[in-house]
Amino acid sequence: MRPARWLLLLVAWGAGGSAHAYPFMIRHGYTQCASCHTDPSGGTFLNEYGRAQSELLLSSKYGGSNEGSDDAADEPAVGRFLGFVPLPTWFRPGGWVREGYLWNALDGKIVDRRALQMRADLGADIKIGAFRAAAELGYGSPEGTPRLAQITHSSTGPNLVGRELWAGLELLDGDGLVRAGRINVPFGLRNIEHPSFVRTATQTDFNEDQTYGVAFAISRPTWRAEVMALLGNLSVHPDAYRERGAAGYVELSLGPTTAIGISGLAARADASLVTKLPTLRQAYGGFIRTSPWRPLVLQVEADLLLNKELGSGNQDLGHAEWLQADLEPLQGLHVFTALEGMKTGATPDLQRGLWGGLWWFVFPHVDIRADVVERWDQGPPTTTFLVQLNGYL
Amino acid sequence: MRHFLFAVFLVGGLVQAAITLPSEATVLVSIQGTAGLHIQGTTHELDVVEQEDDFVFQVPLSHLDTGIGLRNRHMRNHLDVEHFPRAELRVPRGAVVLPVSGKSSEADAQGTLTLHGVSRPCSVHYRAEQGLLGETRVRGTTRIDMRDFGIEAPSYLGISVEPAVAVQVDFSLRGL
């Protein structure tokens, strides 16, 4: 691997804040995200119903049977901040801490090891009648600041970070939401693995790739969709680097545990962050989520990437793919693996990756995850080991 | 001994009334809610008997499974299964066109649905297909409004479901 690419890989992992959107919840018949999440396409904030499902379906159960047959399950302690502070239904505060430790190996030799401050955010969302709003404010360490989400711009000290900030109105009896602000870009699977090729190549992760714009989302029992006018990421300076365009997806539910969707994105910037030249960036693809057997969820995404240098006629054609299997043999304990591939103009050789790991939702609002990621390019393989502890209120 | 005799008479009575126990029975209940919520409940318990020139379809509700235990419990409470343990559809035999061997028939039939202790007229669309070995494969569908049966549309933690409920019943039967 060339030094520049190696550096990019380290930066991508190092800036590894994260939130939670779990597309594997389709195993429980939840093809829609809006039932549980404030963001109708899935994301950080959970509504009361989502908090209840998190407690009932996501976390390990001790001394009882799994959720599928546990009719005697206790009522979840939702609606109470920290589990005991009662809250009004219109105000939902949240807090997130994610800490990790990472080892990077090149050709089998550890070349980098460090603690990662991945996330330390506070936020809240408000729902008063049809009015909705959500905002997050976080701390980014000097090494761990997600640069595309920073509010302050210190290159040596810590920074304030803001991933989401939006306000909007519910429409269509709550099935629709029109909103404006800093919003997750609607595209593809909203998988939590933000360094995955499909998320980095399309620049649609929800660690830092949110952008300002106006979006309309709709969630129906058999389909969902969101379109967004991209007006530029205000964390990026100067203005020439800000991309403007549109993105969106539509997903159809083929059954209670299978959904298939298509996405599109086209955005133009006067100066690409990579080449510094005027660029039109496009991505088009499809994605599938399916649970053929309740413990198993398969997720697939394949995207075509087009980058055109405006004025020069140069155009790069690339692609990115992701195939993930998530197995939950016991409630709360996940074994996962993923295969990925990517080829772009900046990385003309096919890059391949293999993911594997364990993910344990130990208690409600606490999970531990361990990943091993092996990636191959034209050089020797790189291996990343990452363990992380996540807690949220 | 008295209990044993009672059981023998009871079983004997059921055998006399029943056409036969349906096989491969699936009762699927679909409910939609806010924000695209789609809940499906399933049970494989279905009794079919012939009484007084009526086909009587009975579905025990206590094992209707929506995939989440707590939700099942809420549903049972909402349906007051303790007092009204079954849903029953009664369709006059004369309202049903049965197919001949190797053929199928499809039509609407008018019946009476009893749920939550309330009986209401109910239109059922059905398709029946007679196999060559004497087995009839049936699919019936209907839509009901739970408010017609004195059941309030449930709401839980800000998520509400619509009162309209789609029901689909599949089963195979011999002896029709």
Image: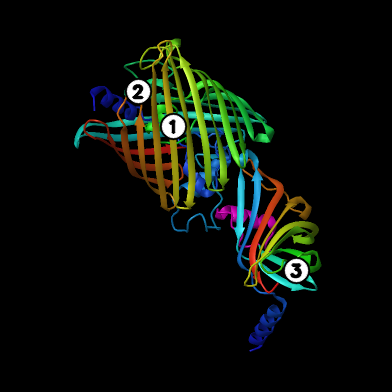
Compare marks 2 and 1 and give the one earlier in the sequence: 1
| Up/down of A242 relative to A137, above or below | above
Q: Amino acid at mark 3?
A: Phe
Q: Nearer the viewer, mark 3 or mark 2?
A: 2
Circle 3/circle 1 CB separation < 8 Å: no
Examine the structure image and report whether residue A320 is included in the region drawn in magenta: no
Q: CA distance from mark 3 to mark 1?
A: 54 Å
Tell me residue B100's x, y (percent). 71, 68
List the residue tagged with mark 2. A345
Taking A92 as reference, is A116 left or right?
A: left
Question: Chain under label 1?
Answer: A
Q: Amino acid at mark 2?
A: Gly
Mark 2 and mark 1: Cα distance apart in space: 14 Å
Mark closer to the observer (3, 1): 1
Helix, strand or loop for disc 3: strand
Residue carrying label 3: B55
Residue lying farthest to the bottom in this orientation: B1
Residue beneath label 1, please? A303
Q: Residue at x 61, y 36 (%)?
A: A219
